[in-house]
Image (cartoon, grey):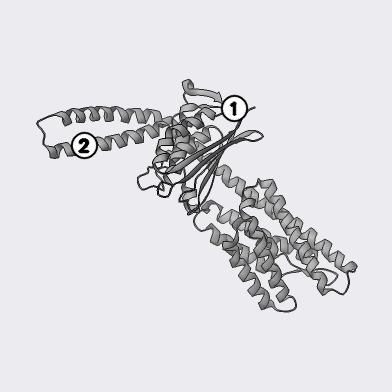
Amino acid sequence: MLETFLINILILLLPVLFFLLFFEKRFITYYKAILIILSMISMLLCMKYPIVLEIGYNVDLRYIPFIIFALFSGYKYTSILYIVLNLYRFYIGGHGSLQSLAFSTIIFIVVPLFNKWFLKQSPKKRILCAVSAAVMTMIFYLITLIAFLPALNDEYWTMAYHTILTHAFVMFIIMILIEQIIANRQERELLFQSEKFEVMSDLAASVAHEIRNPLTVTNGFLQLLQESKSISQEDKRYIDISLNELKRAEGIVSEFLAFSRPQSQNMVTSNLKNEIEYARNILIPYANMHQVNIELDYHNKKKVTYDNNQVQQCLINLYKNAIEAMKDTGGTLAIDVTEKKKAIEIQIKDTGIGMTEEEISQLGRPYYSTKKEGTGLGMLMVYSTISKLNGKIHVDSEKGKGTTFLITVPAGK
């Protein structure tokens, strides 16, 4: 029994290690398909090589990858595992096929319900939730098994003990590895972003000022030329186009200047209330134009040190993006500021067009924008500013239902 138990643990560990070694750095494009295949293989191998208890019962760990995938992915992709699990169970045959179908159906209906709640929890809570789900699943299985047994003898309780303990232990080990993979990936991304922002801070101020000087001179001469009476209307039209393009270039340079290091004359220590209200008040007319209502709920006394110009521009960019996501249909922009144990949380929620997971993953990259006329520098500036505050940004979005930005900034008392 011990040998088979160790083989089952290895079967469940191999996909995790395989993904870590070969696919973790290529996480974006095909990772879900890879995870489905790896989970499917481990689930089928667990059914192929069950743990044979000395009392004559077989126990397999098929539901561990099934539960993990259901918690992390929800219904859409778990349905594939559900179909494969039951097809293979009927292929194996023997007693219990219909019971397996009924039991897996209940798990498939119930467990993915907690998907969105599960993803919002801390790593420790996710581990605890996954272990609890595995234990509760096996308790439910053992309860349903009572109907098929003549009596609850010592063999039944021995099997129940081994089944629950085995699932709890293996789920705990697998979840620790998964959470470590997630943590490593997040740390690598934060390191990459901080290095990128550091380089941009060094270059932004000098490059932007050097570009702005010839832009200002060119703009001045074009305005003088436009006032001349010796040029035709057609030439003036070209000058107007040139001035508009110079204005757009000036806007891009201004956005680029926001990546420079925080300026000492702008540094303040505050609870962010003035900046949050300032950005809201500036954009109220713009919101009214697009039938967007801005709601602010502020509950925070904690303070943080920051460059108030950069934070104001960061918040303006976020509010403006949220309003533009609702400009065709109108809606509500909800801003909720709360204090946690050692941080300030700013939640910016809209009811706009939403984004796909692929679009979310690209946010903060230079020159990537979901808007046709966008440069992507606005969101890059947002991520840069929050990074300077040692904060984190979590984005939750669904196409057609809206987007929520949750910003967490470390703060003092």
Disc 1 residue type (three-letter): Lys
- Kindly indicate the quadrant of the structure image that contains residue 155: bottom right
Q: Is any part of residue 45 visible from this angle? A: no
The residue at the far bottom in this view is 94
Which residue is label 2 attached to? 240
Residue density around tag 2, few if under 14, some if 14–19, many if 20 or more, within 10 Å: some
Q: Secondary structure at mark 1?
A: loop
Q: Is any part of residue 384 visible from this angle? A: yes
In the image, taking residue 307 as reference, residue 102 lies left or right, namely right
The residue at the far left in this view is 230
In the image, taking residue 238 as reference, residue 212 lies left or right, namely right
| Sequence-first tag of 1 and 2 | 2
Give coordinates of residue 252: x percent, y percent.
35, 36
Number of on-image labels: 2
Give coordinates of residue 158: x percent, y percent.
86, 64
The residue at the far right in this view is 154
Q: Secondary structure at mark 2?
A: helix
The residue lying toward the viewer, choosing from 195 and 64, is 64
Give coordinates of residue 143: x percent, y percent.
80, 66
Disc 2 residue type (three-letter): Asp
Which numbered marker is on residue 303?
1
If the image is split into quadrants, where does the N terminus sit?
bottom right
